[in-house]
Amino acid sequence: MRRDRRGPPAPFVLPPARAGALDPGMFCTSAEGVPGVGGAYALVVELDAPLAVALPGRAAVTLAAGRYVYCGSARGPGGIRARVGRHLKRGKTVRWHIDRLTEAGRVPGVWVFPGGNECALVAALAGWPVPLPGFGSSDCAACSSHLLGWPPGAEAPWGGWR
Ligand SMILES: [Zn+2]
């Protein structure tokens, strides 16, 4: 007798956030060890309290307390090493929107992808929540946001996490 395979819908499973074409990424908790070359990075930021963030021309959105991943790139002098050093530094002048988060919250570490592309990192996190459309992606046609919410309980997208 054939069993009826129809049943309750399977629970939603986040798609694997591993970028096939990319290096696996190195998880770094300081700028030491980050190569001073161009590339991309996925910065982890933890907010202990809600934070209101306003993008130009848009109403402020309050980011809930929780963990976020910001995907960026650096191709100038010092490359991703210099950029990661800036993100990890406390007391910086707020220049980019991400600076508001890193100053208000904590940065436990960052995955770095020498030679990588930040939009490929965002694509690898497809299915993760977009808390603030347009964040970091105003000049990007491919992504709705370069800031993603880390779903509670979701596995780390790349290796070496903590
Ligand atoms: Zn993008």
Image (cartoon, rainbow, N blue to C red):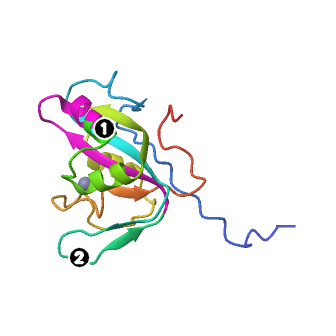
Picture quarter with the C terminus: top right
Which of the four quarters of the rendered structure image does ligand 1 lie in?
bottom left
- Counting from the top left corner in percent of width and height, residue 37 is at 20, 27
Q: Is residue 102 above or below residue 133?
A: above
Magenta range is 65-85
Which of discs 2 and 1 lies nearer the camera? The answer is: 1
- Counting from the top left corner in percent of width and height, residue 154 is at 57, 52
- Counting from the top left corner in percent of width and height, residue 91 is at 28, 44
Q: Secondary structure at mark 2?
A: loop
Mark sitting earlier along the chain (2/1) = 2
Q: Secondary structure at mark 1?
A: loop
Residue 71 is covered by the magenta coloring: yes
- Residue, x 32% and y 33% (percent of image)? 113
The amino acid type of the residue labelled 1 equals Lys
Classify mark 2: residues with Cα within 10 Å, few (<14), some (14-19) or many (20+): few
What residue occupies the far bottom of the structure in this picture?
A: 59
Real-space Cα distance between discs 2 and 1? Answer: 28 Å
What residue occupies the far right of the structure in this picture?
A: 1
Classify mark 1: residues with Cα within 10 Å, few (<14), some (14-19) or many (20+): some
What residue occupies the far top of the structure in this picture?
A: 33
- Residue, x 25% and y 57% (percent of image)? 97
- Residue, x 39% and y 37% (percent of image)? 110
- Counting from the top left corner in percent of width and height, residue 112 is at 34, 34
Q: Closer to the camera, 25 or 18? A: 25
The residue carrying mark 1 is 89
The amino acid type of the residue labelled 2 equals Arg
- The quadrant in which residue 60 appears is bottom left
Residue 149 circle label = none
Picture quarter with the N terminus: bottom right
Q: Is residue 151 above or below residue 131?
A: above
- Residue, x 41% and y 51% (percent of image)? 105
The residue carrying mark 2 is 58
